[in-house]
Structure formats: C-alpha cells, structure tokens
Amino acid sequence: MDNIYVTQPFLPPLEEFQPYLEQIWESKWLTNGGPFHQELEARLAAYLGVEHLALFANGTIALVTALQCLRITGEVITTPFSFVATAHSLLWNGIKPVFVDIQPETFNLDPEKLEAAITPHTAAIMPVHVYGRPCEVESIQTIAETYGLKVIYDAAHAFGVTYKGESLLKHGDLSILSFHATKVFSTFEGGAIVCPDAKTKNRIDDLRISATPEKSLSLRPASTAK
C-alpha cells in the first residue's frame, strides 16, 4: 500500500539545479554571505514587499537571534499553540515564557487576554500567525505601545501573506520566517528575520556571524528546528 502524505515538497528538476551547484563548487564560497545568499535575500525581500531580510539556517535560530537583536530579557508573552521552538527560543535566551490562551476560531493569541498577563518584568509579545492566518495585529500593537513592549511575530506559516494590501511581515518590530521542507516556501532547511531598517539588519548580520548562541543551541534536540 502506498503512503498518502499530508504534504510533499515541490522540487525542481535536478538538471535545473545542477548548474547552481557547479557555480558553488567553482567559487568554493559555501557560507558567510556568499553571492547566492545575498541574491536570495534581495529577491525574497522584493517578492515579499519588505525592506530588509536576513537569512538563517532555520527558523529556530532566527527566533533566538531576533530576541537578542532587540535585547529582550525578563518575560515574554506568547502562545501555547505553536511548534516547540517558539517557547524554546525564549528559554535558550534565559527568558521566561508567559502563556496566554488562544482564540478558538483562529487558534491565534487572544489580544483580550494579553493585558492580564503583563507584569513589570514583561518585555515583549511573541504571537504566531497560526496556519498563516493573521493575528489581530492592530490590537496587539496598541497594547504593546501602551505598555512599552516589543512585538516579535513568529510568521513561520505566513510566507507571502498580505493584510490590508501590504505584507503581513511588516507588522511588529520583527517577523520570523521558516523555510523548512514542510513550509509553503522551502530551501530544504532555512529561515529569515524580516526587519524594518538597515541599522537593524546590520545588527542582525553581526549577531548571525559573530554571536551565535552556540552554548545554548548545542543542547537543542535535532527535532526542534523549524
């Protein structure tokens, strides 16, 4: 009996992929911002309608780095309805996750329950656009501005999603994408941080190259990468 898969990745014909591999082999530039890396960042930013985008090995490391970029400490309000990496990225940074319940209709973080979870130690909100359905971004932003909180969206499901005519990824301080093989857009493994300005992009690039949290991520089980 043949297996019936929920989803399978679309792969280009191997002969179309081969010339790119040959260029990589010829250049011997395999990492740290090579020409294909830079081209993919630029093309993805243009396609998604965002200003800046930084590529990562997976969405999990992108989440970890986004928290470091914004210097988040203390507590972060997030959702219990997500892949484990959402909460793990907080724990690996020494941040306490505070879970708020979801809306039964959307499975997204319920903004009406956010304020009750805010304490003097709350530094940020990390909602998830579950299955690509937009969170109530205006309500979340209003609460964040009222209490001086950062907003980081786990947008692993939300590649290419628009909201009111613009990219959903423009909302919040940062948005994180996953390019895992199970996602709408896949690079086999991969992820990205979408950021609003060049200064933030430069800081993320510096963290990616020189300040990867090797000690904490070395404890990460292989199955937790987005």
Image (cartoon, helix red, strand yellow):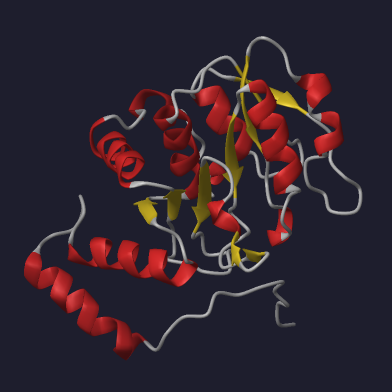
Is residue 16 visible in the rendered image? The answer is yes
What percent of the width, then of the height, locates residue 28?
10, 62
Which residue is pictured at 61% across the width and 26% down the height?
149
Residue 20 appears left or right of 164: left
What percent of the width, then of the height, locates residue 100?
80, 30
What percent of the width, then of the height, locates residue 160?
56, 68
Residue 53 appears left or right of 89: left
- 36 in relation to 85, above or below: below
Which residue is pictured at 30% across the width and 40% down the height?
199
- Quadrant for residue 24, please give it: bottom left
- Quadrant for residue 201, please give it: top left
Between residues 124 and 58, which one lies in front from this camera angle? 124
Counting labels gives 0
Between residues 132 and 25, which one lies in front from this camera angle? 132
What percent of the width, then of the height, locates residue 101?
84, 34
In the rendered image, the residue lying farthest to the top is 120
Which residue is pictured at 44% across the width and 72% down the height?
47
Is residue 78 visible in the rendered image? The answer is no
Which residue is pictured at 73% across the width and 50% down the height?
135
Q: Quadrant of the N terminus?
A: bottom right
